[in-house]
Image: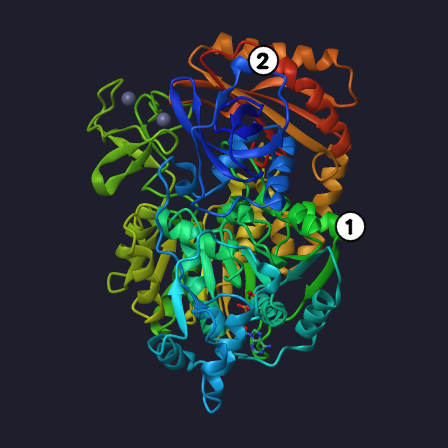
Amino acid sequence: MTIVRVALDVPLPTLFDYTVDEAVVAGQRVIVPFGRRQLTGVVMVCADSSLLAADKIKPVVQVLHDSAPISAHLLDLLRFCSDYYHYPIGQTVLPALPARLRSDKPITLKAVLHYRLIKGTVDFVPKRKALALRIMEMLHQQTCSLAQLKILSAAVGVQLKWLETEGFIEQFVPAAIQLAVHTMPVLPHTFANAHQLTHEQQMVVDSVTGASGFNCFLLHGITGSGKTEVYVHLMDFILQQGGQVLLLVPEINLTPQLEQYFLSRFPDALLVSLHSGLSENARLANWQRAQTGEAQIILGTRLSVFAEIPRLALIIVDEEHDSSFKQQDGLRYSARDVAIFRASQSAVPIVLGSATPSLESYHNALKGRYRMLKLTARAQVAASLPAISCININQTVMTEGISGKLLREIGLRIERGEQSLLFINRRGYAPVLMCQECGWLSDCKDCAGKMVLHLKDHKLRCHHCGFQIRMPRACPDCGHKELVPVGSGTQRIEAVLQTQFPAARILRVDRDSTKNKRAWQTMREQIHANEVDILVGTQMLAKGHDFPALTLVGILNPDSSLYSSDFRAAEKLFAQLMQVSGRAGRADKSGEVLIQTAFPDHPLFRCLISHDFEGWATSQLAERAMAGFPPFVFQAMLRAEGMIEEDVYSYLNQARQSAIELHHVVDIMGVIPASLARRANHIRAQLLVQAVSRRDLQQFLRAWQPHLRALSSRNLRCSLDIDPSEF
Ligand code: ADP
Ligand code: ZN
Ligand code: ZN
């Protein structure tokens, strides 16, 4: 009788002991009784004894054999995450697996058939059948799938048929997926090498391929410098060695596009994608193809950092600064940071790529903890950087939020058959509706925010909680008939442009206009086919692939992020503006960027205009050092929300008191309202703790945890966020 310690998806920070009377290994999935339910869990430890009394320990209901056990490697990674993010082990392990592996229904996937010899047939194949003989030789060593046999020749199929009909070999379903990874043959692949690398690109590729073991590289390359080309060459190198590459990308919107792109460069490689947009079956199938070592390239969003990749040889994190790498609920992990840990655990290189690295990564590179690699020129010889300038909105005539200069430039582009893009980070018609008589504003009844006017469907809608009402005809307070929209969103800009350029083809791209699954794809095709003159949109437009006819970018209201209470807002704004500016101009057409602002002398714009990321990063780092913000300190945020204000604050104040009494070398800030102090009728507040070293912070958090658990948090939603990215 063995004791197994099992991770279960329940909010308790422990493993659960069960008995089992068959042989099991760590990583195996089991179904166990838990209270009145049955749950699927993962065996973390097999032991001889338990601290519990023998009659308290229940037996495992079923050991699942339908999938290979989770590797010790992945279990270690998950243990690290549970530990570092101070999150229950079971709620770390199980959500990291594809949903099908978490359910208690056995998985029935179409298994990959293998070929094997029929005993005693090796000597009977005629000598003239060379390929058939080689197949027999290979199968003599081990059973193989069709994909593995294709290494011999693309024409292997005909010979396999023949061998099968002659009774030399047979197909069978392997009982369990055997991870004979080290004996797996290296599959040949075709590499569509489109470009001769530039000197700079070659240096970058050589640095990475020349490194041995774990190295963290920060690839800082301006937009259009050919980072993707560098990735592709690195992948080619790794694939030649029989390794697997994990490529992490920020947006699920972009993964199908990227998947197609990388397939075009590696037409016969096995590439799988992992993201939350896949069906459960597809996600499991892809996950297992990574697990068997078959998949050579794993392309995925943040969750793919928890894929099984037995022959992992390189990790690439594209757009490493992107905030979507940070998960904002459950295990609040940063996929970039976990990827770095994973690379060090696997002793492989990792490349963090960006045109605007996060200040954390940039600081680490300056300090020599990461190796800085730079691409300073656009890859295509003729391509120049866009000319960026500011329009002072206080010194010019504005037509409903658009300056005369910008309107004129758009007009010029339409005449020339080129495209313009107006970037405004607000969807809807106007961010708030106001009564001119009494000053009534369209507050959300349940949130501290305003309801946004969506004129198209005559609704006021809260973007925080989703609450919506019909647009009132008169002021709810004083009955005044004239309610005015204040400020602009994408819909209003679209409307203004329609009156200014009645003949122009205008396309609005935001979350509202791309709700349907295919919509964004169709829009992209329209843009590429040059069926659009003016694009209006949110950050969705900043990312993604080239729009070759786009030569003008107008940036409409960036100012709110300049003096935000979130110290990262300016960093994010700079990255966003750099990225959207990079959309303007390509090889044969130069681009122009116009920024409408009341602060044209702000250092952010001055650095942007001179394409000076270094200058910007240096000044920001100096400010952060002065103010004692990350990356010079490490932070943890305790958040609480609940219906009753007193409960929320009393929980946080008690937590704060217990923190102070621990006397650790950490700074414990005051309890303050969250930046959105009320959402969906819940009061929200937070408590920040920070330390100069990560180790001090971790030690403190370990000591603090039991106190937090002892506090009553009934009716509250509480979370501890390590390295928080949002305030
Ligand atoms: P980034 O990802 O850094 O923004 P991309 O990899 O998308 O840049 O490259 C920008 C453009 O330059 C693409 O059209 C790409 O095909 C082209 N390109 C990249 N490397 C080279 C090269 N060595 N020679 C010619 N063109 C290149
Ligand atoms: Zn009124
Ligand atoms: Zn609301």
Numbered label tally: 2
Q: In the rendering, at what x and y percent does residue 557 appear?
A: 47, 46
Specify whether 306 is left or right of 658: left
| Residue at disc 2, secondary structure | loop
Label 1, residues with CA under 10 Å away: few <14, some 14-19, many ≥20: some
Give the residue drawn at x 53%, y 19%: 685
**Residue picked out by circle 1:** 369
Label 2, residues with CA under 10 Å away: few <14, some 14-19, many ≥20: few
- Write down which quadrant ligand 3 falls in: top left
Most foreground residue, 358 or 87? 87
The amino acid at mark 2 is Ala
Residue sitting farthest toward the front: 120
Quadrant housing residue 485: top left
Most foreground residue, 637 or 561? 637
The amino acid at mark 1 is Arg
Asked which colour scheme the image uses, the reply is rainbow
Q: Quadrant of the C terminus?
A: top right
Q: In the rendering, at what x and y percent does residue 244 appear?
A: 58, 61
Is 267 located above or below residue 83 in the figure?
A: below
Label 1 to label 2, Cα distance in Å? Answer: 49 Å
Is 38 located above or below residue 151 in the figure?
A: above
Is 357 located above or below residue 583 in the figure?
A: above
Residue sitting farthest toward the bottom: 128
Q: Earlier in the sequence, mark 1 or mark 2?
A: 2
Quadrant housing residue 235: bottom right
| Residue at disc 1, secondary structure | loop
Specify whether 532 is left or right of 633: left
Q: In the rendering, at what x and y percent does residue 173 appear?
A: 39, 58
Q: Quadrant of the N terminus?
A: top right
Give the residue drawn at x 71%, y 40%: 631
**Residue picked out by circle 2:** 53
